Image (spheres, rainbow, N blue to C red):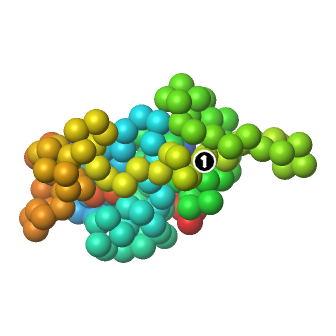
Amino acid sequence: MSQHQTDGGGPGTAPAGGGPPEHAELPEYAERVLDVADLIPPGRVMTYGDIAEWLGEGGPRQVGRVMALYGSAVPWWRVVRADGTLLPAHELRALDHYRAEGTPLREASRQAEGHIPRIDMRRARWDGHARGDGGGPGGSGEPVGSGDPGGRGGRGGPVGAGGPGEKAHT
């Protein structure tokens, strides 16, 4: 059985009768996506497109689909839309996480509907390098999983993007 399993609950998980069965083994691409989401440091984010580009496979919609179906098993709030807007129906939960982690935000103007802040993408976006030492899990300075044709990450599982179990938004 894979490391990440659906928990049958949480944001964006498929309703009963739709989506994967609870505790189903994940497709390889989904496992890779979720592994990448797990690597994003607190206070930082990657977009759906960033993850697809980093993996060299799929696109924002495919990553979003993985997050919608399986993302509740990882820190889903760290996988975001490219414009920094928060996921509809999950804004407040995500905002609590962003504030707790110190994720850079841009406060909404009074004219903005609901006055919900956006993520400050310029400051919050993570490029796949580990913080502090300038290197990935191996300390090489390369993005995590780069140069590893087998796609295996430091946790012994495939490296991939991942996410929140949220609905696909690109």
Residue 97: x and y, percent?
A: 54, 31
Q: Position of residue 18 (x, y in %)?
A: 49, 59
Locate the C terminus and report the quarter of the image it occupies.
bottom right
Looking at the image, can residue 15 be seen? no
Question: Given the current orientation, which residue lies at the most extreme top position?
Answer: 100
Point 29% across, 66% down: residue: 55
Residue at left offset 37%, top offset 67%: 52
28 on left or right of 84: left
Quadrant of residue 75 within the rendered picture: top left
* Camera-nearest residue between 4 and 55: 55
Which residue occupies 37% across, 55% down? 127
Secondary structure of residue under mark 1: loop
Nearer-the-camera pick, 144 or 161: 144
Q: Is residue 105 visible?
A: yes
The residue at the point 45 percent across, 42 percent down is: 44
Pointer 1 residue: 120
Left/right of residue 35 with respect to residue 75 in the rendered view: left
Q: Horizontal placement of 20 versus 119: left or right?
A: left
